[in-house]
Amino acid sequence: MIRQALDIQNFKLEAGGCLEELHVVYHTAGPKDGKVIWVCHALTANSDVEDWWPQVAGSGKLIDTDKYFVVCVNIIGSPYGTTGPASINPATGKPYLLDFPAVTVRDTVEALVLVRKHLGINKIGLLIGSSVGGYQAIEWAVKEPDVFENVAFMATAPRISPWMTAWTETQRMALEADQTFRQAASVKGGEAGLRCARAQALISYRCFRGYGLRQSEPSDDCLFAGRAASYQRHQGEKLPARGFDAYSYYYICNAMDSHNVGRGRGGVAAALGRIKASATVAYIDTDGIFPPEETLSWAGSIPGVRIEEIKSDFGHDGFLLETEQLTRIIGPVICKL
């Protein structure tokens, strides 16, 4: 995919204030005259879909970058190019860190709209979003219903739940417990807290069954169980190692708490009723943060929706791992483009 950027001046924010300079990084691939497939990425991913979804996106794959014009935009607050807490504050000449303004999911969707217009795209054949990417996709499908022909929302919801907010707050507490985070002396502040927050998050992304399958002790005679502990530490180390900083994590978690498509629209059901695209909603049977019963409580508010189940031993992360089932669900939609 090709990395590009759009610079926006005086970008007004939903919670008040503005970003004097908003630098938005995005990636595209495929023929510009092909049908558009737009992917919204999840919390710690980036705008290069082939990087984090290699089983699904790429040449000759389900999201075929030889055939379709594929677009993904890096969210506001991310450390991977788009303006965020690690960016230079033009007012001070130093990184924003904890001076970064509050941003919302709707702010990121507004940036998506501006990139769409910049690229001259009037119709999107398929909009795909999973997890936090699904937050963006649902909000966008409600905001601009005439733009989309098809939408696919997977392992997500139209409004953040108290359960999900509890998880994000617990992770913020881990960041705040690292004294270097509040000192905000450099972008490296809060790394120990970030490792802890990431390890906490991973538990919510997986499930009891998956840990039993992959992290059980190799011997019945071990004295102290340590395989799962080692795995948690390894996963915690991976996030800062790939350039993610604690401040970006903090602000993106805050943005997640803003998610509510029903705000100012008469409630969630009324907002979802605005969607005009042919919609597919998929849930994962073992997802602990977007459980099946939650999905089934709201998906029917989308006119003509198709609801599908993904079976997985790996909880929420099944949207990244269950490639055959994703192909079964999304493949027929792509074939219609």
Image (tube, helix red, strand yellow):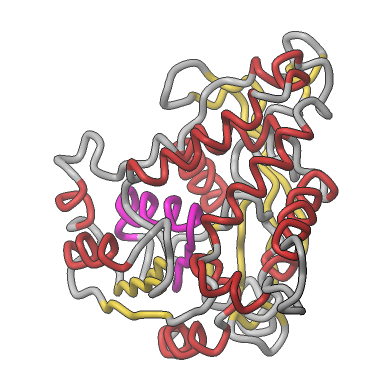
Instruction: Looking at this view, name the residue that lies furthest to the top.
Output: 92
Q: In which quarter of the view is residue 215 placed?
A: bottom right
| 41 in relation to 200, above or below | below
> In this picture, is 221 found above or below 3?
below
Q: Where is residue 147 in the image (x, y as percent from the top left)?
A: 37, 60
Q: Which residue is drawn at 45% across and 51% down?
A: 136
Question: Could you tell me residue 278's position as x and y percent?
Answer: 29, 74
Nearer to me, 328 or 297: 297
Relative to residue 200, is residue 311 drawn left or right?
A: left
Return the x and y of residue 113 as percentages of the image width and height: 48, 47
Q: In which quarter of the image is the C terminus?
A: bottom left
Is residue 141 covered in magenta? yes
Please indicate whether residue 5 sits to the left or right of residue 188 in the image.
left
Residue 61 seen in this snapshot: yes
Question: Residue drawn at (31%, 41%), measured in percent from left and top?
Answer: 260
What residue is at 25 percent from the left and 36 percent from the top?
Answer: 263
Question: Which of 81/133 is in front?
Answer: 133
- The stretch in magenta equals 125-146
| Residue 150 visible in this rendered orientation of the protein | no
For this rendering, which residue is in front, 310 or 207?
A: 207
Figure label count: 0
- Residue 108: horizontal and vertical position, in percent? 51, 41
Residue 178 is a magenta residue = no
Q: Which residue is drawn at 51% across and 66% down?
A: 207
Foreground residue among 69 and 322: 322
